[in-house]
Image (tube, rainbow, N blue to C red):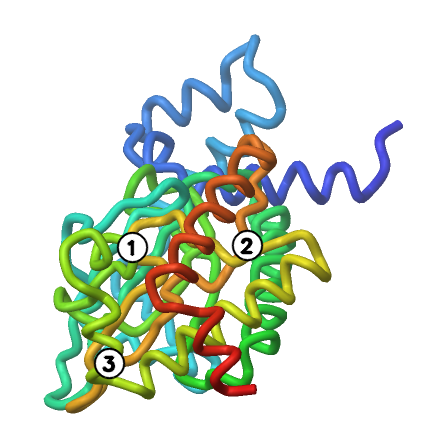
């Protein structure tokens, strides 16, 4: 006989399927009835069908309330824009446009790599949050480097299934990838005009080097605009847009580390890191 926990998980999965899965939600009532009374249907499919019928019978004027203090942002102050504004190896990026004058818009990063049921996604989101806090603590000497971010589980616009979502401030289209910038412009000249930015970059390299030596890991320097320069009033500053490690199991970690190392060494040379460190000593 199966344990109570087994049946609890199966029912939880059936509820998730009935209320979230777009294909199931689009089935007709007759299809659900055929499933319930079909001789060869599994108990799981029958349960999904019954829950789906219950979902369709919920009154349309039923209001779902929430407390904004329990959410990272107030959803009533933002408008979700259809279509992605960016796409990476793990995330589809959507714009949450602010409805409030003077308030920044936000981005919604929907993770399409980590799958599973809600419990599994929550566990993974906790891991991601822990990694973020570690990176933030590691770079605490650069308080403006790591942007605030919040994670939650929600329905993915891509397939209607539960997914990990990350909310971050939107920094506009003027954000410049540091590595692409080095190929188009003279970075040393830019840093001569902005000593604060150069000091941030020197400290970023120093902390990243120490992190690599201590843990064998680096923050992600490979993703598009992950390490960027943004406008902050009249100044420019360094921003780590994706403050996480590269540790996905499907990637060749040794190859990734070699590419990371190459980028960091290139950055060291471009900004004259060794000279700057000796001058500050």
Q: Nearer the viewer, mark 1 or mark 3?
A: 3
- Nearer to us of marks 2 and 3 is 3
Residue at left offset 55%, top offset 54% = 245
In this rendering, position of residue 238 left or right of residue 142 = left
CB within 8 Å, label 1 to label 3: no
Mark 2 falls on what kind of element?
loop
Residue 109 position in % (x across, y down): 35, 56
Could you give the CA–CA distance between mark 2 and mark 1, rounded to whole angstroms?
18 Å
Q: Which mark is residue 192?
A: 3
Mark 3, secondary structure of its residue: helix
**Quadrant of the drawing holding the C terminus:** bottom right
Report the mark closest to the observer, 2 or 1.
1
* Quarter of the figure with residue 136: bottom right
Residue occupying the far top of the picture: 40
Compared with residue 123, is residue 131 higher up or lower down, i.e. above or below?
below
Q: Give me the disc on residue 38.
A: none
- In the image shown, does 206 or 13 lie closer to the viewer? 206
Q: How many marks?
A: 3
Mark 3: few/some/many CA within 10 Å (<14, 14-19, 20+):
few
**Which residue is at the front of the view, 158 or 128?**
128
The numbered dot on residue 179 is 1
Q: Earlier in the sequence, mark 2 or mark 1?
A: 1
Classify residue 227 by image quadrant: bottom left
Q: Residue at x 37, y 32 (%)?
A: 24
């Amino acid at each position: 006989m199966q344990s109570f926990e087994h049946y609890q998980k199966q029912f939880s999965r059936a509820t998730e399927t009935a209320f979230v899965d777009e294909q199931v939600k689009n089935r007709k009532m007759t299809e659900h009835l055929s499933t319930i009374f079909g001789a060869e249907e599994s108990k799981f499919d029958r349960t999904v069908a019954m829950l789906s019928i219950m979902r369709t019978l919920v009154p349309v004027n039923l209001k779902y309330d929430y407390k904004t203090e329990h959410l990272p942002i107030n959803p009533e102050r933002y408008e979700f824009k259809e279509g992605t504004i960016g796409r990476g190896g793990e995330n589809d990026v959507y714009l949450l446009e602010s409805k409030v004058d003077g308030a920044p818009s936000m981005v919604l990063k929907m993770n399409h790599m980590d799958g599973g049921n809600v419990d599994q996604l929550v566990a993974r989101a906790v891991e991601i949050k822990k990694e973020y806090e570690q990176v933030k603590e590691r770079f605490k000497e650069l308080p403006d480097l790591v942007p605030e971010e919040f994670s939650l589980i929600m329905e993915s616009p891509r397939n209607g299934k539960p997914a990990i979502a990350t909310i971050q401030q939107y920094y506009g289209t003027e954000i410049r990838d540091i590595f692409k910038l080095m190929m188009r412009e003279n970075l040393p000249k830019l840093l001569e005009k902005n000593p604060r930015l150069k000091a941030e970059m020197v400290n970023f390299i120093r902390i990243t080097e120490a992190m690599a030596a201590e843990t064998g890991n680096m923050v992600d320097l490979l993703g598009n605009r992950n390490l960027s320069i943004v406008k902050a009033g009249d100044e420019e500053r360094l921003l780590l847009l994706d403050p996480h490690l590269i540790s996905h199991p499907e990637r060749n970690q040794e190859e990734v580390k070699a590419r990371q190392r190459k980028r960091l060494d290139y950055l060291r040379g471009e900004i004259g890191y060794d000279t700057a460190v000796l001058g500050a000593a």
